[in-house]
Amino acid sequence: MTEPTATTGPRDVTNDDEFCIELDSLPREDGALPHVVVVGGGFAGMAVVKALAKAPVRVTLIDRRVYNTFQPLLYQVATGGLNPGDVTYFLRGLRLWQKNVNVVHEHLVSADHVAKKIRLLNDQWISYDYLVVAAGVTTNFFGTPGAKEYAFPMYSRSQALKIRDNLFIRLEKATKSRRTDDGLRVVVVGGGATGVEVAGALAELRTTGLAPAYPEIHGDAFEVKIVQRGQEILKAFAPKLREYAAAELKRRGVSLHLGAGVAAVEEDGVVLTDGTRIHADLTVWSAGVHPHEEVSGWDLPLGEGGRIVVGDDLQVEGMPGVFAAGDIAISPSDLQQLAQPAIQAGKQVARNIRALIEGRPTAPLRYVDKGTMAVIGRRAAIAEVNGPGGRGQIRLTAGTAWLAWLFVHIMSLVGPRNRITTLAGLVTRYGFPFHRHPIPIVGDVPTVRPPKRAAPSPDGEARRERSAQVS
């Protein structure tokens, strides 16, 4: 038996701490297997963990949340199409088929890379032989005044639920208005894939699910508008696909305001850089992302946009054995901040860790671009699908692209239960004949309660008693 090299600090007595005491403070009988610490349970982090399932290592996965989120479908949660459990996976469920992994629900605070250890928020230290930073990113408001206070981002499960709740709160409020033109105005900031998908889902919800349920909201009083700084939406796609998407959005009643960015967000509207003010009862922000602020305290080299600088093999510059992958990392090839680059990077990190353990040289990430997709609504989507090795591109639209999008997203979910429930939810929302009157998953609208009666004063009670005696 060998003694571990971890240094432990003061800690609270919790289940996670008990695990780490066992992991880092007690003798082991496993031949002192190398310890791989993965920070972040997103696409990249999960890919690393699963790729090390049969490797001769111990894996510790650290995440601030207890679940993995399939972010490409969060907009379905926000618009009442799916339950939040459909797009999230319990991280500790990895233990069902992967015994060399343990999950710690904590938050990385700082690191001592010379001593090869990291410190968590509870003052606990965990040592590592190999460290993988895949902590993801968060919403970028670009310093826009009022955006953080009044706009609703959609990068986590809780944020998606907040949008759904506020959507239904505002719908119920609109039904009580006596003005026939008073309804719901939703502004979606950002014309990328996320913005288009949110706007399309809202339009689908309005024209099918809500029209019979909210007869009090007259005509086109439920408006959906996309605000995009550039002159076109979906800039990452081919021009013909952009044109198709714009035409489909307009056909579904989504208006586009192009060529002006957002200068400020107010409680009931957005002010654009061209001076236009657009009324908004609900502003959804889908304009960009950046790393969490605390990344600057992790003693790692940062590059453009505050992302961690890595080499072609995804090792952090000047720090052997330390890797970064996913949206938080910036490599010489500067891959897009999408799911596929993160997944492939995570798998390459796992291969390189095994290479280092076996004394072999690391290899660069050879990214294979499989294409990109965006869905607009029922039987409407766009897709650019690349052939093997990234050769030959097929461009799809309409129902064919929608079916391809459905297959890819269902198969990308973690766990069979999530695939089945998500498929059922999407079929119920879009499939024939359910699409005619799909019942949305309602948000949490506050309960209507009678006002509380004020407690009677002692003087008032005495006067009532005297009056009763006189009568």
Image: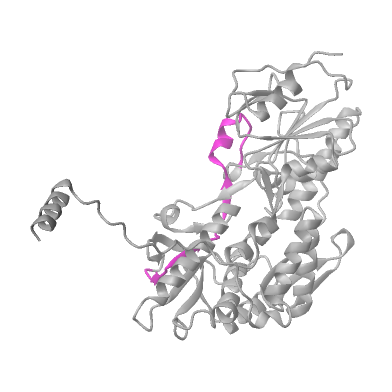
- 374 left or right, relative to 415: left
Q: Horizontal placement of 298 versus 339: left or right?
A: left
Which range of residues does the magenta coloring cover?
275-303
Return the x and y of residue 117 as percentages of the image width and height.
Answer: 68, 23
Front-most of residues 99 and 131: 99
Relative image position of residue 224 (x, y in whole percent): 51, 74
Q: Nearer the viewer, residue 212 or 139?
A: 212
Front-most of residues 353 and 415: 415
Q: Residue furthest bottom?
A: 219
Q: Quadrant of residue 360?
A: top right
Q: Where residue 79 appears, x then y in whole percent?
A: 58, 67
277 drawn magenta = yes
Q: Is residue 203 above or below residue 150?
A: below
Q: How is the image coloured?
A: one colour
The answer to whether residue 258 is visible is yes
Relative horizontal placement of residue 323, taking residue 158 as reference (left or right): right
- Residue 292 in which image quadrant: top right
Residue 189 among those drawn in magenta = no
Identity of the residue drawn at 65% across and 41% down: 135
The C terminus - image quarter: bottom left
Residue at left offset 72%, top offset 28%? 319
- Is residue 402 positioned above or below 66 on the image? below
The answer to whether 95 is drawn above or below residue 462 in the figure is above
The spot of residue 341 in percent (x, y) is 75, 52
| Residue at screen point 45% across, 51% down | 143
- Locate the N terminus and report the quarter of the image it occupies: top right
